[in-house]
Every structure is written in structure tokens, then in C-alpha cells.
Image (cartoon, grey):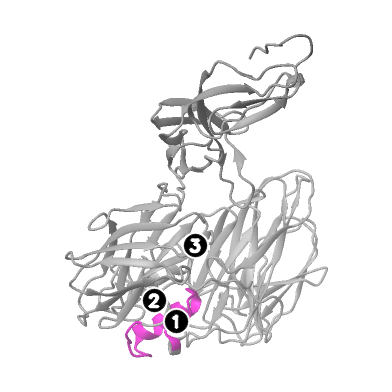
């Protein structure tokens, strides 16, 4: 703007600059005026000077100016249980009224500038190995800057959110309610999907809001044969986590011979799609489920997966494998329910352990009549550790052992019982960096079946079951040996070996399939790098006329008063392993028919042929 003076003097007063909707005013002496346009588009900029007593008012020649908008945002990577981290190098694409591509900076930020006002745009990020939430953001008739086009990246293999059918079990003829659970992120607003089912056993009764989506709005369409469409809009944002969002009630037919029916997600009559509150699409995966019918008999599990209609020895074999987790019950059948049969009065307790083996034996032998399946359909989470210490004088103990150098060590597991124990199951836990390659073997003289799994690092599962008693009243008896390979090195603190309940509960059973109170006492292996070897003591227990004596108990006591007990085998043989070099030991034999003198052994290395002969 040029000021025209009528004569002498300096112009004073104010100048106003306007784009037609926004303006700014400043004194002539300031020389500048900052104008911020509040709407996009082509603007005509004008300047007006009102004049003063010495200078006439005037207006500048109008100038044309284009005002653009920008879209900016931030991309972060999801961190479970922590703060999300910025993602650099993510490609962000813009489509719509303008096409462009940018890459996020070290702070995860991106910006699209010089965008024509009033345009419509779609913003979508992309990076290898990631999927983003939301998948894209759409903006229509953009007349102001967009400052929060934010995205969160998730590991593509893990997914963002999953809607899954929670399989349910039922007796034919009953109604069944199927929960649909969503792994929610908290930004879900609506979801559409369809469920396929079999009309032979099932008929849709009603669809309602889930427990975690109160007040939701639901539209359902069951007009298509064996297809149910569901549209749900949430009244309030979901709390992040596993949330029950919809429940579907089915009525079932009473045909006991009908098979399980799958519930599968599909796109007819309603296409699968999820949106946030702004209408942006959300990445969602879908996990099918099933309605599973209770069938068969308790303990009938052979001939996977529905049983074979009989109760035979092969059922015991299969249940043994379930107990130690060499086999896992199939979730689409009531296999767990049938395997978990003890206690009999409740048809199971949600755990697979030694008592279930004993109860299966009772069914098969005819001690108990066969019954229809019942009880829990799936495992009940165990949160308690095995009972520690002494309980009614019945204990299962992990022995102490010392390993010298880089070699093998045998750790005994013993039971101090009351004479009514016929089975035991337990999990052993240890440090797999110090103890490796566990091998489980029955102790001499134990007439039982051993089932175990030692394939998982740091864990061994063990089941011992017998048709007769495992111990004698008020006596200690070795059940198994666990052999480990150990590393050498300098002497270190003892490596703990402890009892656990996961996956195999630590349980002792009587002949009726009932749990017996028992304490579980942990043990340890002491590692030494001295280069010496641990030793063994072995021999034979004999009658006065030289015959081998089976089922005799041999008790070894060290100089500190600690005792270990083994039971002789068929020919009277016994063996103790993992003993310290140079130890001082006393041997004693416990027998119902014969009397033996204690025998004290001199210090030394391996000692074999230490025969113990009964007195005449």
C-alpha cells in the first residue's frame, strides 16, 4: 500500500488487512500485520488505510492468495503392558483429492501439506510385518488442518483384535448359550458378521448383548438357511481386554447320536467388518468354535475322539498319556470330561491326575458300574502349589544328590506312606541350564506302571499307578529315580528341584480313586567341579539259605542321619546311586519275615556285591 501525503507530516493511524472472512489490524508504524486465514480456498487480500489529519485514506490493489490445509499424525508400535513406541520408516499413503506418499520420521510423525481445502482424503500406513489400527482414516470436505491422524502398529502374525466363538458343551435337548468374545482395543464402535451352523441339531432362539456390552444395539438376520447375520453397535467404548460382546442362544434337538456342530464365521447374510467411532475400518480376525455334545461313558477315551463304546485296558493307556500331557484332550469333543472321572461322586474335578487312573481301573474291573459322562468339560486352572511339608505322616520327597564334574546324577523320589497308596502323579520343576536330559525309571521292587514326559525343558511329569499298594504302612519306599546330565565347573549352590501342579497335579490316590492328604517335599542337586565322581552301592538281599528276597526294604543312612530307602527286585537286588565320594554309610534291611544285622560300610568309592544276609 502506498500512502499519499497532502503535504508535510508523517502518516499515523492503523492499517487493516482482510481476506474477506478474517482480518488483522496494526499501526502504520508497525509495518506488518499477521493475517491467519480460518478457511481454505482462494482468498482476495485487501489492505485499507483510514487516513489521519495529514494523510488521506486509501486502499491497496487486491491480491489473490490460495489457502491450503494439511494432514499430520503419528504412528506408534503397540507394546503389551507398556508404553507404545514411535515407528520410523513407515510408508504412509494419501489418496482421494490428492495422491501422495511420505515416510514417518524418527518420532513416528508424518505430514501431508499443501492440500486443497474442501477435498476428501484417505490416509493409510504400511510396513512389512505389521498391521495397523485403524487400517485407514477417511476425511471428507476437509476445511481445517487435521492434526491427529494417528495409527498403532501391531505384529501382523499376532493380529490386532480377534472375535471368537467360545465353544460350549451340552446335553442334547437342552438350550445352549454361545458367548462371542472380542479381544478389544477400546476403540471399537460397531461390528457386522455372520455365523454358520447346522440346522440338524440347532435352531436360533435369540441374540443378545454380551455381559461386557450392556445397552448395545443388535440387529440379527436368521432368514438364510443355516446362516445367522449379526450387527452390533456398542453403547459405550469397550474396555480393552477379553470382552463378551454378543450371546447367541440355540435350542438343540434331543438326538443323542447327532455329531458336534461347528460355528463358523462368514460373510452371508452380513459381511464381516468392524468400525471405530469415526467410521474407520478396523483389522479383525475371526476364530470359529463349536457346540460339543456330551457323549460316551466316563473313562471311555480310546479310539479317539468319541471313545469306542467300551471300557477296556486301552482306555487306561490313553488316560495315562493325558495325565502326563503326552496327549492333549481334543477341545472339539468331550474327551477331557470323560478322562476326568475322579472323584466319582462329582464325575471329575477339572484335573487329570493319578486319581483318574484309579477310577478308570475301577470302571474296567467292574468295581464301579459304568456311568454317562459328567463333570467339568475343560481343565480348571490350578493356582495352588502342592501342599508342602508333612500331612498326616504321608509325604512324597525329592532326595538330595551330589554331582561331581560333568556327568550323570540320579535323584530318588520316595514316598513315606500309610499303606493305602496305589497311585501318584506329580510335576518336577528345575533349572534346565544346569540339569538336562532327564530320564525317569522305576525303582527296584516297585510293581507299577510308569508313564512320564521329559520333553519340556525344566519340567518332568510323572505318573505311577499300581493294582496293589505302593508302600507299606508307616514306611518309606523309593518310587522312581530321575537321572540328569549335569555340567561341571566350580562348586555352586544346590540346584533346586521342586514339585509343581502344572501341567500334572501332584496328587496321591487310594484304591477308590480318592485324593489322599500328602505333603510334597522339595529337594536339590549339589553341583561340584572337583573332578571326583559320585558313587553307587549295590548288592543282594538274601534269605539264610541264599535265595534272593524280593520286596524287602533296604535303608541307607549317611553320617548326618539322612536316610534313603529302596525296595529289592525279584531276585533281591538293590542299588543306591548318587552318593558322595568318601561318605560313611550304614545299611539296614526291613522285612516282615526275616531279621538282619545293620551293616556299616567303610569309606570308599563304588561298592558292589554288598550282600545282606538274613540271620538264621
First in residue order: circle 1 vs circle 3? 3
Vertical order, 338 against 369 (above or below): above
Residue 358 located within the stretch drawn in magenta? yes
Closer to the camera: disc 1 or disc 3?
Answer: 3
Quadrant of the rendered image containing residue 232? bottom left
Vertical order, 305 against 519 (above or below): above
Tell whether label 2 touches label 3 (CB within 8 Å).
no
Vertical order, 512 against 523 (above or below): below
Along the line of sight, the residue nearer the viewer: 314 or 67: 67
Closer to the camera: disc 3 or disc 2?
Answer: 3
Residue under circle 2? 337
Q: Position of residue 218 (x, y in %)?
A: 35, 67
Q: Position of residue 615 (x, y in %)?
A: 68, 82
Considering the numbered disc 2 on the image, is that residue within a helix, a strand or a loop?
helix
> How far is disc 1 from disc 3 in space, using C-alphas?
28 Å
Along the line of sight, the residue nearer the viewer: 326 or 47: 47
> How far is disc 1 from disc 2 in space, using C-alphas?
7 Å
Quadrant of the rendered image containing residue 517? bottom right
Q: Which residue sits furthest right?
A: 560
Residue under circle 3? 242
Quarter of the figure with the C terminus:
bottom right
Tell whether label 2 touches label 1 (CB within 8 Å).
yes
What is the span of residues highlighted in magenta in the rendered image?
A: 346-373
Question: Which residue occupies 49% across, 43% down?
Answer: 155
Residue under circle 1? 348
Amino acid at each position: 500500500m502506498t500512502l499519499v501525503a497532502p503535504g508535510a507530516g508523517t502518516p499515523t493511524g492503523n492499517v487493516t488487512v482482510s481476506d474477506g472472512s478474517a482480518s488483522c489490524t496494526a499501526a502504520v508504524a508497525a509495518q506488518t500485520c499477521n493475517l491467519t486465514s480460518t478457511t481454505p480456498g482462494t482468498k482476495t487480500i485487501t489492505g485499507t488505510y483510514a487516513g489521519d489529519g495529514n494523510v488521506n485514506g486509501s486502499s491497496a490493489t487486491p491480491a489473490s492468495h490460495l489457502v491450503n490445509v494439511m494432514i499430520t499424525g503419528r504412528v506408534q508400535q503397540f507394546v503389551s503392558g507398556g508404553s507404545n513406541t514411535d515407528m520410523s520408516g513407515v510408508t504412509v499413503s494419501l489418496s482421494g483429492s490428492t495422491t501422495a506418499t511420505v515416510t514417518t520420521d524418527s518420532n513416528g510423525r508424518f505430514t501431508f501439506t499443501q492440500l486443497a481445502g474442501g477435498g476428501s482424503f484417505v490416509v493409510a500406513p504400511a510396513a512389512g510385518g505389521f498391521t495397523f489400527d485403524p487400517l485407514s482414516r477417511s476425511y471428507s470436505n476437509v476445511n481445517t488442518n487435521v492434526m491427529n491422524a494417528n495409527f498403532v502398529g501391531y505384529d501382523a502374525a499376532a493380529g490386532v483384535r480377534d472375535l471368537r466363538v467360545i465353544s460350549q458343551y451340552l446335553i442334547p435337548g437342552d438350550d445352549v448359550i454361545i458367548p462371542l468374545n472380542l479381544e478389544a482395543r477400546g476403540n471399537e464402535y460397531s461390528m457386522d458378521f455372520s455365523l454358520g451352523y447346522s440346522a440338524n441339531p440347532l435352531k436360533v432362539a435369540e441374540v443378545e448383548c454380551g455381559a461386557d456390552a450392556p445397552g448395545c444395539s443388535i440387529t440379527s438376520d436368521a432368514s438364510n438357511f443355516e446362516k445367522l447375520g449379526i450387527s452390533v453397535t456398542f453403547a459405550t467404548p469397550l474396555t480393552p481386554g477379553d470382552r463378551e460382546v454378543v450371546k447367541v442362544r440355540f435350542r438343540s434337538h434331543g438326538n443323542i447320536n447327532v455329531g458336534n456342530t461347528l460355528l463358523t464365521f462368514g460373510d452371508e447374510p452380513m459381511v464381516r467388518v468392524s468400525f471405530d467411532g469415526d467410521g474407520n475400518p478396523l483389522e479383525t480376525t475371526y476364530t470359529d468354535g463349536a457346540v460339543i455334545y456330551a457323549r460316551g461313558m466316563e473313562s471311555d477315551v480310546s479310539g479317539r475322539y468319541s471313545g469306542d463304546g467300551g471300557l477296556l485296558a486301552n482306555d487306561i493307556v490313553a488316560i495315562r498319556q493325558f495325565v502326563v500331557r503326552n496327549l492333549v484332550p481334543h477341545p472339539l469333543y468331550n474327551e477331557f470330561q470323560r478322562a476326568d472321572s475322579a472323584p466319582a461322586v462329582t464325575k471329575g474335578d477339572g484335573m487329570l491326575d493319578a486319581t483318574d487312573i484309579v477310577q478308570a481301573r475301577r470302571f474296567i474291573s467292574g468295581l464301579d458300574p459304568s456311568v454317562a459322562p459328567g463333570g467339568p468339560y475343560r481343565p480348571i486352572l490350578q493356582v495352588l502349589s502342592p501342599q508342602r511339608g508333612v500331612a498326616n505322616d504321608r509325604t512324597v520327597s525329592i532326595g538330595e544328590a551330589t554331582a561331581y564334574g560333568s556327568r550323570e546324577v540320579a535323584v530318588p523320589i520316595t514316598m513315606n506312606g500309610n499303606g493305602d497308596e496305589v497311585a501318584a502323579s506329580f510335576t518336577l520343576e528345575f533349572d534346565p541350564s544346569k540339569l538336562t536330559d532327564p530320564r525317569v525309571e522305576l525303582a527296584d521292587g516297585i510293581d507299577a506302571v510308569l508313564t512320564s514326559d521329559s520333553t519340556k525343558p525344566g519340567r518332568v511329569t510323572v505318573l505311577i499307578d499300581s493294582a496293589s499298594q505302593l508302600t507299606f504302612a508307616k514306611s518309606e519306599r523309593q518310587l522312581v529315580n530321575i537321572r540328569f546330565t549335569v555340567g561341571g565347573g566350580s562348586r555352586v549352590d544346590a540346584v533346586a528341584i521342586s514339585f509343581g501342579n502344572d501341567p500334572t497335579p501332584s496328587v496321591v490316590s487310594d484304591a477308590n480313586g480318592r485324593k489322599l492328604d500328602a505333603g510334597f517335599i522339595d529337594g536339590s542337586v549339589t553341583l561340584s567341579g572337583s573332578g571326583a565322581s559320585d558313587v553307587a552301592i549295590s548288592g543282594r538281599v538274601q534269605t539264610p539259605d541264599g535265595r534272593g528276597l524280593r520286596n524287602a526294604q533296604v535303608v541307607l543312612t549317611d553320617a548326618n542321619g539322612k536316610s534313603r530307602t529302596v525296595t529289592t527286585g525279584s531276585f533281591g537286588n538293590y542299588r543306591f546311586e548318587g552318593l558322595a565320594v568318601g561318605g560313611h554309610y550304614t545299611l539296614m534291611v526291613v522285612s516282615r519275615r526275616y531279621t538282619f544285622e545293620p551293616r556299616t560300610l567303610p569309606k570308599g568309592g563304588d561298592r558292589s556285591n554288598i550282600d545282606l544276609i538274613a540271620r538264621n
